[in-house]
Image: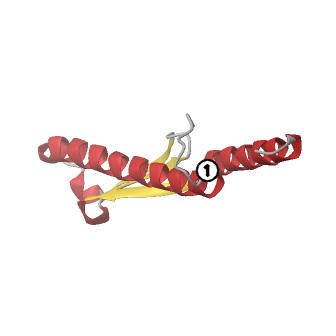
């Protein structure tokens, strides 16, 4: 950083990146799409879809496992998008807490 205007530019880039993170939406899937989770950039689940064929008492444990796998898939996608966006601002790989 050479001067104040560079700092202001970086601050604007960070604010824009944070807004994009808050607005992003990803979908995580498991079981070949039988369980699907939509998640925003703040790791909040926006929707959950479970194929009706899974909704039997015998499948309860499997549904829980598929939910966890779909959540982890969505979380990984959010992290990848955040990392990709931040690398454009901080090419050296500096991590930020959002």
Pick the quarter of the image with the C terminus: top right
Q: Where residue 95 appears, x then y in whole percent?
A: 53, 41
Q: Closer to the camera, 44 or 35?
A: 44
Label 1: which secondary element: loop
Q: Closer to the camera, 72 or 93?
A: 93
Q: Residue furthest bottom?
A: 32
Query: In the picture shown, does residue 96 fall above or below 51?
Result: above
Q: Where residue 40 appears, x then y in whole percent?
A: 55, 47
Q: Where residue 73 appears, x then y in whole percent?
A: 35, 53
Query: In the picture shown, does residue 17 fall above or below 31?
Result: above
Visual colour scheme: secondary structure
Pick the quarter of the image with the N terminus: top right
Q: Residue furthest top?
A: 97
The residue that appears at 52% across and 49% down in the rendered structure is 93
**Which residue was labeled with disc 1?**
90
Query: In the picture shown, does residue 62 fall above or below 35?
Result: above
Question: Mark 1 packing: few (<14 Cα in 10 Å), some, or many (20+)?
Answer: some
The residue that appears at 22% across and 54% down in the rendered structure is 54
Q: Is residue 56 left or right of residue 41?
A: left
Q: Residue furthest right?
A: 5
Q: Closer to the camera, 98 or 64?
A: 98
């Amino acid at each position: 950083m050479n001067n104040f205007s560079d700092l202001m530019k970086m601050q604007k880039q960070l604010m824009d990146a944070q807004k994009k993170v808050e607005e992003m939406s990803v979908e995580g899937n498991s079981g070949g799409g039988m369980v699907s989770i939509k998640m925003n950039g703040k790791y909040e689940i926006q929707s959950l879809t479970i194929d009706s064929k899974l909704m039997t008492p015998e499948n309860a444990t499997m549904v829980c496992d598929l939910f966890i796998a779909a959540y982890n898939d969505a979380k990984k996608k959010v992290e990848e998008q955040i990392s990709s966006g931040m690398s454009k601002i901080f090419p050296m790989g500096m991590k930020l807490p959002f």
